[in-house]
Amino acid sequence: MTDIASGWTEAAALVVREQTLITVKADEVRARLPFAMLGLDVDNDSAFINETLVNFCADRAIELTRSRAYKKNDQAWIEQKNGSVVRRLVGYGRLEGEASAAVLDELHRKARLYVNFFLPCFKLKSKTRHGSKVTKKYERPVTPYERLLASKGLTEVQDEALRAVFATLDPVQLLSEIRVIQHRLTQLEVSNGNAKVDPPEQEVSKFVASLSTSWKAGEVRPTHRKPNAGPRPWRTRVDPFEQTWPMIEQWLNDESDANAKQIFARLQQIDPAIPANQLRTLQRRVREWRTAIARRLVLGAFDNAAPENKEKVIS
């Protein structure tokens, strides 16, 4: 959920996308908002457009509206937070089950304080068009917390409560706790694969000391896209040319100018049952075989060369 006026953002985790669970989470978010929820604008998902949510909003005097069909810009405010907040914090790993949902919900509860109280965000001030050129001007970036206080839309009680919460927060402590929860979340990813994530520092003092050098390691978020671990050492499918490859390799040695399509035609003459869609696989195998032969010839000649000849080749 995102408040358009201030940019205040709230997120919650659901085990499944179900209308009753959505009303429960909406009530939780509504209770921790620093202002009253007057309206709720949703997209056209069936989890939102249903009688359960209509009754929920009617009972709490919340105006319920929805975006227009096939008008994707109606949801631009919330969609931009999917990238700048949710994906940046959670990453792209696949999460399943109640345990993952509980950790994800814990991450959102910590992140809401860091995002809303300490992360400045831009707000569009004006937009003018001159022919095909569009000029945009933005307001000075401020945090949603600062924008709320400046709006004068809060009651005196809400204003004091919001300032009291801010006085108890430490951004470094919050960031350290977020890193710990992110690490726990990566351990629950279904698609974590072979990626190894080093556990973060538990003590805030050590976490602060590591900030000056952590940039050297690149991306430090545990939930960031995992680096490629290299090619898989196993096959996911049976090799269709495992039995015939020695014969194919002999043909390639005897006829160096033969291409994979000609080799495949010869194979089909021997065994007409070979499906035609395996030609692409054979072309890839032949290309890899010829690449290996070329590398062996070039690198083998280089390895056997005298030291002075190596220097000439390098230069």
Image: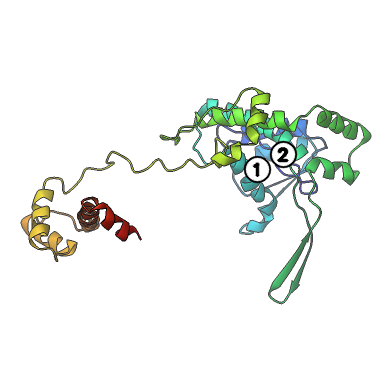
Is residue 282 left or right of 125 when viewed as pictured? Answer: left
Q: Residue shown at 74%/48% (left/top)?
A: 121
Image coordinates of residue 59 in percent, x first then y, are: 77, 35
Residue 33 visible in this rendered orientation of the protein: yes
Is residue 33 left or right of 278 when viewed as pictured? Answer: right
Which residue lies under the disc numbered 1?
Answer: 85
Is residue 167 left or right of 15 when viewed as pictured? Answer: right
> Which comes before the other along the chain, label 2 or label 1?
1
Question: Between 26 and 80, which is closer to the camera in this rendering?
Answer: 80
Residue 115, numbered label? 2
Image coordinates of residue 171 in percent, x first then y, are: 74, 33
Q: Residue shown at 9%/63% (left/top)?
A: 255
**2 and 1 marks in contact (CB < 8 Å):** yes
C-alpha span from label 2 to label 1: 8 Å
Question: Between 69 and 126, which is closer to the camera in this rendering?
Answer: 126
- Numbered marks: total: 2
Identify whether 24 is placed above or below 305: above
Q: Quadrant of residue 297 in the image?
A: bottom left
Please identify the residue farthest to the right as the structure is shown.
Answer: 156
Is residue 183 left or right of 36 when viewed as pictured? Answer: left
Identify whether 49 is placed above or below 257: above
Image coordinates of residue 107 in percent, x first then y, are: 63, 31
The amino acid marked with disc number 1 is Val
Q: Is mark 2 on a helix, strand or loop?
A: helix
